[in-house]
Amino acid sequence: MTYEDGSPLTQGTVAGEATIEGKLVAVQGNVQKDGTFEWGTVSPGDGAYPGTYRVIVLPRALGDGEISQGMLPDVDRKFTSYESSKITFEVKRGVNSLNIKVSKPAARAN
């Protein structure tokens, strides 16, 4: 996972959901320092069932002190909603690779 300039997103969570055989299935994985992640369904890194997933990227939560200092999340909030991220990914049997490009939020106006 990278920003538009090619640098990696180094923390956060990538989550997905799909309807498989009539049931809603959720997956998630933590973003590593190099921008990679592995999805897990039941336990971290155990993979995802084949199917088409809607995908979101959740930045690391900021503490009150960071917010009061004007820090912004690492990812634009449009990536935190399935409706606005507009990212989908088809998981197939075998090894899969999902390369997501994200953007940072715009600076706050004073």
Image (cartoon, rainbow, N blue to C red):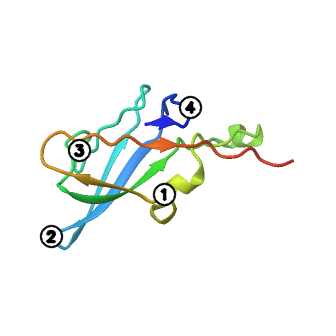
Disc 4 is placed on an element classified as loop
Q: Is residue 85 above or below residue 64?
A: below
Going from N to C along the chain, the mark reached first, 4 or 2, is 4
Look at label 1 and name its amino acid.
Answer: Ser
Tag 4 residue: 5
Residue 81 x %, y %: 49, 60
Tag 1 residue: 85
Q: Residue at x 26, y 60 (%)?
A: 52
The numbered mark at residue 43 is 3
Gap between marks 4 and 2, in whole Å?
39 Å
Q: Residue at x 70, y 38 (%)?
A: 71
Residue 67 x %, y %: 71, 43
Name the quadrant of the N terminus. Answer: top left
Look at label 3 and name its amino acid.
Answer: Ser
Disc 2 is placed on an element classified as loop
Gap between marks 1 and 2, in whole Å?
24 Å
Q: Quadrant of residue 66?
A: top right
Going from N to C along the chain, the mark reached first, 4 or 1, is 4
Q: Quadrant of residue 64?
A: top right
Gap between marks 3 and 4, in whole Å?
32 Å
